[in-house]
Amino acid sequence: MSPRALVTGGAGFIGSHIADALLDRGFTVVVLDDLSTGRRENVPSGCEFAQLDVRSADAARLVREGAFDVVLHEAAQIDVRKSVNDPVADASINILGALNLLEAVRAAAKRPRFIFASTGGAIYGDFVTPPNVEEYAKDPDSPYGIAKCAVEHYLAYYGRIHGVEGGVLRYANVYGPRQDPHGEAGVVAIFCNRLLDGRALTIFGDGKQTRDYVHVKDVAAANVAIATAPLPAVGRLDARAMNVGTGVETDVITLAETLRRVSGRDAAIEFAPARPGEQLRSAVSIGKARQLLNWTPQRTLEAGLKETFDYFAAKR
């Protein structure tokens, strides 16, 4: 019998690619998504689909009774700016939604492994020097980052006290096909659409702020790896947390110039005032994922951006 996986947020950008990768590895996959931001057409045809809110009793029942081997929790409110404007709504989805599922895992007759999608940028803040390693102090500058950090603490607690087998992947800035213009990596989708529209690429601030851009298919491969790999013994907060990125800082000007080159579109670059509170530098160390999951990213930024631009061009 094939292993069973539940992917929450599986109609979204990252979750749908994870569902694809799991199907390719022979998993039976169930996708849970409320379609508030996800799209039904993103769900792979080989998946079962449940349109549910992660905070609902029905979602908890599905986790308790679904006989899953692994739950990959991707569903989230992902916009940092929205979390700043409405931290209560952000916490309702990102903290209470995760707790609803964790309680269901704890109560399940067959307890699945619980993999949590965290953040490798917002959780560390600007008080450390990249590339960030998992043991760095956590000092997030947004309610979004605070919520991700809180759920990591809860997952460590459920592991130590209740024996729940959990793991954490801290994503860098994920980009690729199916991306929407939300979150910090959304700049790639925004730039692609502006290039296709013949509009200028707008850079906020001086363009020297850096991010670690990792392709969504590499992120999906990391999720497949952690779904089945042996995990370290339960311990402190960072024991089962692994960064997923490239370890390379890319500034926004370089990103824009690379996209112009691979797309063959000579759009202008314009500058706008910096956005308050924006993180200045971000990149993650991936040595732990390489060691424990035998995972490394396979796509260069240039190749990944070309694939992403071609995807958006084909959608026109």
Image: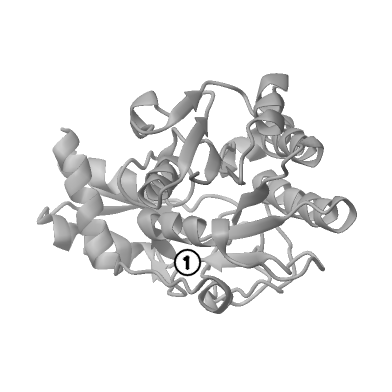
Q: Which residue is mark 1?
A: 245
Q: Position of residue 130 (x, y in %)?
A: 56, 76
Coloured how? Answer: one colour
Q: Quadrant of residue 296?
A: bottom left
Residue closer to the observer: 109 or 90: 109
Position of residue 118 relative to residue 8, above or below, is: below
Residue ID at (76%, 34%): 104
Q: Residue at x 30, y 46 (%)?
A: 177
For this orientation, the residue located farthest to the front is: 1
Count of picture labels: 1
What SS does tag 1 mark? loop
Measuring from the top left, give residue 120's x and y in whole percent. Answer: 58, 61
Residue that sits furthest to the left in the current view: 264
Residue 35 seen anywhere in this rendered image of the structure: no
Q: Is residue 297 above or below residue 162?
A: below
Can residue 103 be seen by looking at this rendering?
Answer: yes
Residue 285, image x, y percentages: 54, 75
Decide: few, some or many residues near mark 1? Use Cα within 10 Å; few <14, some 14-19, many ≥20: many
Q: Nearer the viewer, residue 62 or 184?
A: 62
Answer left or right for 66 relative to 180.
right
Picture quarter with the C terminus: top left
Residue at image position (48%, 53%) is 274
Q: Residue at x 47, y 66 (%)?
A: 245
| Residue type, mark 1 in image | Gly
Q: Quadrant of residue 210?
A: bottom left
- Residue extending farthest right: 161
Q: Position of residue 13 (x, y in %)?
A: 41, 41
Going by the image, does 60 lie left or right of 198?
Answer: right
Using the rendered view, name the quadrant where residue 190 is placed. top left
Foreground pick, 185 / 5: 5
Left or right of 89 in this view: 217: left
